[in-house]
């Protein structure tokens, strides 16, 4: 895929008078898996919504390869950025294969039907996500974890160079979480995609990320490679929790250990 760069310059955002993102400057590049960490209410989801173009910054600019995100049409954005949210509700009894086919919508001309290539992409993604056996099931009959994997598959079917994950693994068991993490990390490294994921689990973030951004009260407290950012001082500063951080050779990353009393 064409290399992508998303740059946020002096970004602020307010809900009415409540400033929740404050003068953020950072750059994300394709070929990398980034994690966003922070306590509840720190602005993690809002930051993703700004990158996704769902919100417009109160101040500052967000550019994708020098073009303002705000200048993209909805169709252009949907071919560029896909979002997997933890609370995406699908209340209609669509079949799993039809939900995943929705990811091809940006590529299907108006008043046209999906083509063979679209259906092939759906089959490919269902195989990758190990949900082919669910394809005829109604999505509203699935468990929370199964439904989340279907939403994940739909985003992969969208085949965008940028993938945003908002606590996308929260409803999955550890086996399926690791499967999905392997898929998106492989997409970043082999297909030059950009992945930006909100996590609550610091150890998963440290294990899988190339870069970590720590937010608190709408401000960036640390941003850099995992080894540099994952420190006791940063964890104390952002989460107000004392912790021991040690390199774990099993996962080839720094891991965090918390006190039990």
Image: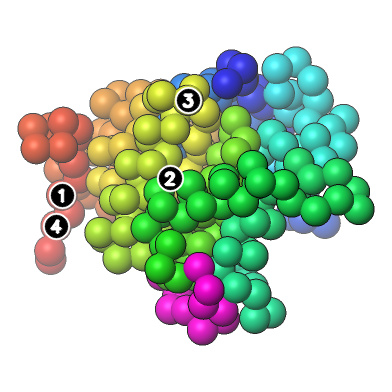
> Does the magenta segment cover residue 139?
yes
- Residue placed under numbered mark 2 in the picture: 37
Which region of the structure is painted magenta? 135-145
Residue visible at 64% across and 42% down in the picture = 117
Residue pointed to by mark 4: 259
In this view, the mark in front (1 or 4): 1
Q: Vertical placement of 142 versus 112: above or below?
A: below
Examine the rendering and report whether any part of residue 90 can be seen: yes
Left or right of 168? Residue 206 is left
**Distance of mark 3 from mark 1, alpha carbons?**
34 Å
Q: Residue at x 32, y 59 (%)?
A: 176
Q: Secondary structure at mark 3?
A: helix
Mark 2 element type: strand
In this view, the mark in front (2 or 4): 2
Residue wearing tag 1: 257
Q: Residue at x 80, y 53 (%)?
A: 113
Q: Determine which residue is flagged by label 3.
A: 191
> SS at mark 1?
strand
Residue 225 shown left or right of residue 65 in the figure: left
Residue 246 versus residue 122 in the image, above or below:
above
Residue 135 vs residue 88: left or right?
Answer: left
Q: Marks 4 and 3, Cα distance to the nearest angstrom?
A: 40 Å
Where is residue 251 drawn, in percent x and y? 15, 37
**Residue 14: percent from left, percent from top:** 76, 49
């Amino acid at each position: 895929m064409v290399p992508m760069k998303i740059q946020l310059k002096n970004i602020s955002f307010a809900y009415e008078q409540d400033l929740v993102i404050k003068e953020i400057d950072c750059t994300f590049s394709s070929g990398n898996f980034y994690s966003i960490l922070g306590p509840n209410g720190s602005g993690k989801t809002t930051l993703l919504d700004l990158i996704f173009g769902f919100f417009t910054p109160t101040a500052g600019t967000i550019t994708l390869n020098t073009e303002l995100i705000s200048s993209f049409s909805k169709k252009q954005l949907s071919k560029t950025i896909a979002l997997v949210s933890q609370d995406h509700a699908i209340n209609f009894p669509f079949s799993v294969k039809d939900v995943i086919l929705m990811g091809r919508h940006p590529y299907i001309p108006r008043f046209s039907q999906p083509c063979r290539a679209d259906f092939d992409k759906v089959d490919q993604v269902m195989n990758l996500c190990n949900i082919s056996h669910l394809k005829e099931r109604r999505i509203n009959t699935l468990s929370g974890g199964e439904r989340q994997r279907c939403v994940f598959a739909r985003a992969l079917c969208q085949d965008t160079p940028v993938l945003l994950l908002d606590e996308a693994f929260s409803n999955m068991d550890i086996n399926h979480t690791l499967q999905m993490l392997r898929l998106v990390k492989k997409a970043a490294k082999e297909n030059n995609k950009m992945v930006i994921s909100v996590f609550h689990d610091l150890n998963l973030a440290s294990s899988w990320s190339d870069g970590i951004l720590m937010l608190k009260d709408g401000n960036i407290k640390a941003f850099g490679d995992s080894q540099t950012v994952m420190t006791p001082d940063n964890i104390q500063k952002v989460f107000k929790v004392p912790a021991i951080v040690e390199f774990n050779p099993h996962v080839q990353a720094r891991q965090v250990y918390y006190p039990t009393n």
